[in-house]
């Protein structure tokens, strides 16, 4: 299990933060505290995943436009809610949206549809992704002691339980992603 974490842990953090990722990043910080990954590597993977994910949504929204969103009523409602939250303070919103639960996945869409300049979004998105990756990754690392106290000595947990939890987490995230994709596409 430790070899799997060491081999694929950074990729898991990168992929998880591409889509949403707070939980994945906290777990990455926990793995760093356990010595399976480096905290700097976890933070770097989270920064790249978060930044590239948001840039991708921004680009796709700008490219395919409001018509594509309008054909997906659930997505359109979420984008409208994010746009309302954004208001006239788009710069502040770009710097803070990833810290609000349920907004991160649609915020780049709302920002792109508002006509916000691409290069400005890229610059502020990079700053925000860096701050978020450091803050949440470090929180996972720092709170590992508390998590260990609650769970007991993590190293004494049977490997079968850890594998089962990892598989359950994987199935949960894939199912959640597929469900959201199905809901957003209007299927």
Image (tube, rainbow, N blue to C red):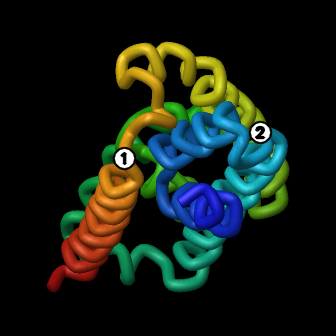
Indicate the secondary structure of the residue bearing disc 2.
helix
Mark 1: give few (<14), some (14-19) or many (20+) Cα within 10 Å: few
Instruction: Please state which of residues 49 and 171 is positioned toward the viewer in this rendering.
Output: 171
- Residue 147 point in image, percent of width and height: 45, 22
- Residue 13 point in image, percent of width and height: 61, 57
Name which residue lies at 28% across and 60% down: 168
Residue 105 image-quadrant placement: bottom left
Residue 158, label in figure: 1
Counting labels gives 2
The answer to whether residue 90 shows anywhere in this view is no
Instruction: Please state which of residues 148 and 116 is positioned toward the viewer in this rendering.
Output: 148
> Horizontally, is 89 left or right of 167 in the view?
right
Q: Mark 1 or mark 2, which is nearer the start of the sequence?
A: 2
Compared to 57, does 79 lie above or below?
A: above
- Residue 25 point in image, percent of width and height: 57, 44
Compared to 85, does 36 lie above or below?
A: below
Residue position marked by numbered label 2 in the rendering: 39
Indicate the secondary structure of the residue bearing disc 1.
loop
Instruction: Please state which of residues 160 and 92 is positioned toward the viewer in this rendering.
Output: 160
Closer to the camera: disc 2 or disc 1?
Answer: 1
Instruction: Please state which of residues 126 and 161 is positioned toward the viewer in this rendering.
Output: 161
Compared to 77, does 73 lie above or below?
A: below
Q: Residue furthest left?
A: 187
Mark 2: give few (<14), some (14-19) or many (20+) Cα within 10 Å: many
Q: CA distance from mark 2 to mark 1?
A: 25 Å
Name which residue lies at 68% across and 51% down: 46
Image quadrant holding the C terminus, namely: bottom left
> Horizontally, is 71 left or right of 86 in the view?
left
Name which residue lies at 75% across and 59% down: 48
> Horizontally, is 1 left or right of 29 in the view?
left
Residue 94 image-quadrant placement: top right
Name which residue lies at 61% across and 42% down: 31
């Amino acid at each position: 299990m430790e070899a799997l974490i060491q081999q694929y842990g950074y990729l898991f953090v990168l992929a998880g933060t591409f889509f949403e990722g707070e939980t994945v990043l906290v777990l990455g910080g926990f793995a760093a505290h356990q010595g399976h990954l480096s905290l700097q590597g976890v933070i770097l993977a989270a920064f790249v995943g978060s930044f590239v994910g948001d840039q991708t949504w921004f680009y796709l929204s700008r490219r395919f436009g409001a018509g594509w969103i309008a054909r997906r009523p659930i997505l359109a409602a979420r984008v409208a809610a994010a746009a309302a939250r954004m208001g006239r303070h788009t710069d502040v919103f770009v710097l803070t949206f990833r810290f609000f639960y349920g907004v991160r996945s649609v915020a780049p869409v709302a920002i792109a549809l508002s006509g916000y300049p691409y290069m400005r979004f890229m610059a502020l998105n990079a700053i925000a992704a860096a701050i978020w990756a450091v803050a949440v990754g470090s929180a996972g690392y720092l709170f590992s002691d508390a998590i260990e106290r609650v769970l007991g000595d993590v190293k004494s947990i049977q490997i079968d339980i850890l594998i089962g939890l990892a598989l359950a987490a994987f199935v949960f995230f894939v199912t959640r992603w597929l469900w959201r994709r199905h809901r957003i596409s209007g299927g």
